[in-house]
Amino acid sequence: MSTNEQPALLEVRGLTKTFTATPALSEVDFTLYPGEVHAVLGENGAGKSTLIKVITGVYKRDAGTIHLNGKLIEPRSPGHAQELGISAVYQEINLIPTLSVAENLYVGRQPRFLGMVSMQLMNKKARKLLKTFNIDIDVTRDLSSYSIAIQQIVAIVRGVDLSAKILILDEPTSSLDRHEVETLFSVIRSLKEHGIGILLITHFLDQVYEISDRITVLRNGRKVGEHLTKELPRAKLISEMLGREFTETLGKRSNQITNSDSKHDTFLDIKGFAKRGMIEPFDLEIKKGEIVGLAGLLGSGRTEMGHLVFGINRSEKGEAYVESKKVKISSPRKAIRYGFGLCPEDRKVEGLIADLTIRENIILALQAKLGWYRHIPYKRQEQYADEMIEALHIVTTDAEKPVRELSGGNQQKVILARWLVSNPELLILDEPTRGIDIGAHAEIINIIKRLAKEGKALMVISSELAEVVDYSDRVVVLRDRKKLTELTGDEISEDAIMQAIAEK
Amino acid sequence: MKSRFFPLLVTFLVFSAIYAYCYYHFSSFGSMRVVCNLLRDNAHLGIAAIGMTFVIISGGIDLSVGSVIAFTGVFCALMITREGMDPYLVFAIVLGMGTIFGAVMGVFIYYFKIPAFIVTLSGMFLARGMAYVLTTESIRITHPLYIRVSKLVYIFPDKGRFTFAAGAFLAVLVIGIYLAHFTRFGRNVYAIGGNDTAALMMGVPVGRTTIMVYTLSSFLATFAGIVLSLSKRSGDSTITVGAEMDIIAAVVIGGTLLTGGVGYVIGTFIGVLLPGVIRTYLTLEGSLSPWWIKIVVGGLLFGFIAMQKLLSTRPKLFSFRRQVRPTTVSTA
Amino acid sequence: MVEMEKQVLTPVNENKSQKATNFKWRNIFRGDNRALWTILALIIILLADRMVSPTFFTVRMINGRLTGSLINTLDGAAPIILLSIGMTLVIATKGVDLSVGAVMAICAAVSAVLINRHEAGSDNILYYPGFVIAIAILVGALCGLWNGILVALFDIQPIIATLILMVAGRGIAQMITDGQSPTYTDETLAFMGQGTIFGMPFPVYVAIIALVVVYLLVRRTALGLLIESVGINAKASHYTGVNATVIKLFVYIISGICAAIAGLIVAGENTYADPHTAGMWSELDAIVAVVIGGTLLSGGRFSLVLSAMGALIIQSLRIGLYISDLHPNANLVVKAIVILLVLLLQSKEFKQAVGRLFKPVLKLRPVFK
């Protein structure tokens, strides 16, 4: 810990928060000084958002203390936290797009003149307020007519104007381009000068080094380190985030059959796919029987790459070839027709049809592919379901149970089963092992390997480095929405991946 | 160009064009007589439509207003004529009932999270059913007060009769504009319609405002019922069937976005008068059939909804920069 | 960890044989235990009707026509059942069709105007009764297609999209009949509303046939599954390759066709088409029938049979109130109360609120264990 002559603005000690038996935060300490930008970094499940939610009073803490300016505080709600002087601005901007900028700044506290809400007064005040941050825009225009960056700045200014001493910024830059990030950063710098303490959460390491003064790393709900930014080398930061030491060689490669030989045909060849605000141009080639792992930190563009390949987001440029034939992947339906399948990251929202039965969920992709008129007979459906329940060891009494009643691991298997039944050539798996128990975890990895042996092309996105190293024939490394490099064969190791991510 | 004003501008232009066309064919459209009749004939629709404007701006819908108007008329007629009660007392009672009715619907919508459309649909059945239960006859009201109100007329030099109903309509219009633009309640309604979760995070009392919106709508519908009863001097449970659809159409044609958050009370005023103008034209013209009103209103409704869709999906046309929706990036 | 234990303990698919027998029932009543409530409600209302009128279940054959309150209930429910079939599918996709009443009026008007030309002596084959019925149904399908295009292709909220036709539809119907309520004498069209086969009113057959046909159409093809899938989770369905556009077009077209047939029945009953009142408020009856039938307004699993029962419940209520000494005009009030009760029982928030209210009572439970 560095010494700081000023007294701390916010002092969090021994913070613990448990959700149904699993601790999301255990004994976390966090200190924020006035006029500093303190970045909190960590991978999925590290506890970043739980930390923010406890500080802003969304969740009640189970143990620990929060001191603001030396006084013990008990934030009950985001509103209460705001009264205390803690404001939060989220990536999903919580403003009202249909109101003017000025109104957004003063919703709920509109200035009144003779008992009437006065727009003139409000606009005047808004203009003055924004001037203090060197922002000069027409405050009478709809908020939605401005860029995300400006909207974000309006949210920040609103937060600060509500007598904020502490500002929490959650992923403020994730949909901004370089120029917009500059604008935002200049506002952040001017906030620092005003003595405001800023807690920053971001996936962009370059930006962390550019703007932050101090870094706290969380992993699995614990604090693993606190450093001054200028004293922390990138490689060390990444190893702390991923929980792997560079010297150790964890995770042996089991997949020694190098499928990347020329004897295997290329299934998919992508040249220069890109989408503004999502991912920079990349090339990607996947052969039949090959497992391509996508490695990178959270927010590095792994999921976005998968979405572009599967047609969920349409690529703005570039070309795609399936078995050397040029194709246009304009929607998931098209992608499925070319033989693709995708197990999404967010099972509940993007994968499962929760109220339908296991059987119906399993046959859905195949049925959608066949069209509504070529109905799979119920007998056949039951066969498919039973086969899959057996093959993937889905734990259930029968196939007629609504899928929402299954556990996470079994739900994941149902989605896998859905694609296996429809027999795709390329399967994109986004975090297939997240949030599932150890037994199911190993099984899913076995399924992945088996599929590759059967000649399927696989694209696996995972934040578990050991896992990626274990099964991948080739690893694509991403950082800050950009494909950095590819590792093949013996080059693949956790060290090499971390090195690649850390490289400037 | 502020895109918020765009639908209102279109409404205004369409209205002006139609009015000008009518004036070109029948110069009587320039007289106070036509103007006063327009105000009088559409007063009850207009008053209820101003309440509906708030509901739609808040992102909801109220299907019960037509039935509430009818119920109020029947209730007033029954109480005043059959029971011989004092009209002022009856008005107070019925306004109280309307207010509670709206508040209860608001509670169902906000606290029990039942879709507004089905809650107010039940409200529509309930109010209409109560009116039927009271009586299915048409009851005349001959109370002296009603006679006195009918004599409250300002007569323009060209024999245009500015009635009480027209006056009440304009008064509610002014109050509506004041509520929408110069009170925190009004601004909160806009905020909720724009994004209710954000509004909640920004400290807007979403629950209270939602309930107040439905309360206001029912209150104004009740008031519209009283005004209609005063000008018709009767109560009939079969009137204003389907009026809610005309009212919703008027609000949308007035430039209010059905998705909520954007709209103007003054636009609703124009939206209510537009079918009236067309009706007057058809009457004067004589050869055209009256069903054209419904078809034209339907057409206008389609036009405005299509325009709203264009505005919301391609704001590039009308505003400085397209809003880029943040893509869902996994958060821990 | 608990999971892994289970995995060891539970043999996979232990009761395959049992499953096969349950399976078909489930398929007809897609609503799990929701089916029970709807059936129970129907039985209670029928019994209440019996109490009000001892002759409720008495069916007599008079002049080759079955008569009695029960037959009247079935006959009167037929148009609502037809509408509720289309409405169920629409609501299952998270939509709603407010225009069915107006579509009924349009199709009734079309049939009356065309058959009038036939009666006036026109030889045009298109004016023959069979063709008239086909054209009216086609017009209904086109109305449905219009709604479907607005919802599926233009992505307009269903309430709003169908509101357009609801507002304009009656005007169109009046335009078709030139503002009149044309009467006709054609027997084929009259048979649609008044005819009997083996003494049973023809509309009852139409409703049953429509129910069976649409049931087979959605359950013997994948349509039912895909409709539910789109209604439950549109995003996941999109990712799985379900073509929501086609599904939505389909359900609105079916709804339009059902409305057209209902319009023909209503017109046939009176042998005239009144563009003002034909199908008035039927859209609301249909929505209520679907809600009572247990299909959630938020879309998802649906049961056509239960919706038809919902329609029967509405009609039994109406007839019951009509024959009882109770106020005959209380029908709407009772209907409103029924909907509110059903909605409250479906509302999670309401259950929680009630739960909080009775918490002290519930807390005592373990003592009795």
Image (tube, coloured by chain):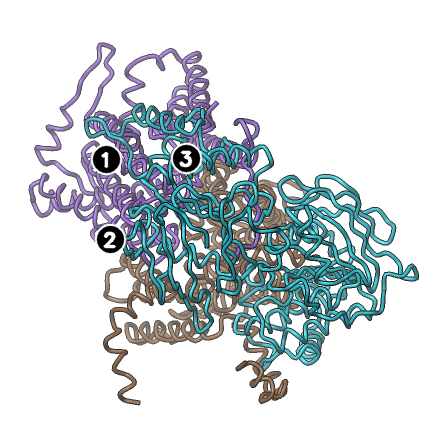
Q: Position of residue B226 (x, y in %)?
A: 20, 38
Q: Name the residue carrying label 1.
A: B228
Front residue of C64 and C355: C355
Q: Amino acid at mark 2?
A: Met
Residue A467 has which mark? Answer: none
Palette colour of chain C: brown
Q: Pinpoint residue B34: horizontal percent, then vertical percent.
A: 31, 18
Q: Residues within 10 Å of mark 1 (few under 14, many from 20)?
A: many
Q: Between A413 and A489, which is closer to the camera in this rendering? A: A489
Whether residue A329 is situated above or below residue C229 in the rendered picture: above
**Please, which chain is the residue tagged with disc 3 on?**
A
Q: Which residue is nearer to you in this view: A30 or A433?
A: A30
For label 2, the residue is B130
For chain B, what colour was chosen?
A: purple
Q: Report which quarter residue B169 is drawn in.
A: top left
Number of residues whose C-alpha sits closer than 10 Å to that of mark 3, classed few (under 14), some (14–19) or many (20 or more): few
User: Which tag is nearer the camera, tag 2 or tag 3?
Assistant: 3
Q: Residues within 10 Å of mark 2 (few under 14, many from 20)?
A: many
Does dot 3 land on a helix, a strand or a loop?
helix
Q: Quadrant of residue B4?
A: top left
Q: Amino acid at mark 3?
A: Glu
Q: Is residue C147 visible?
A: no
- Sequence-wise, which precedes: disc 1 or disc 2? 2
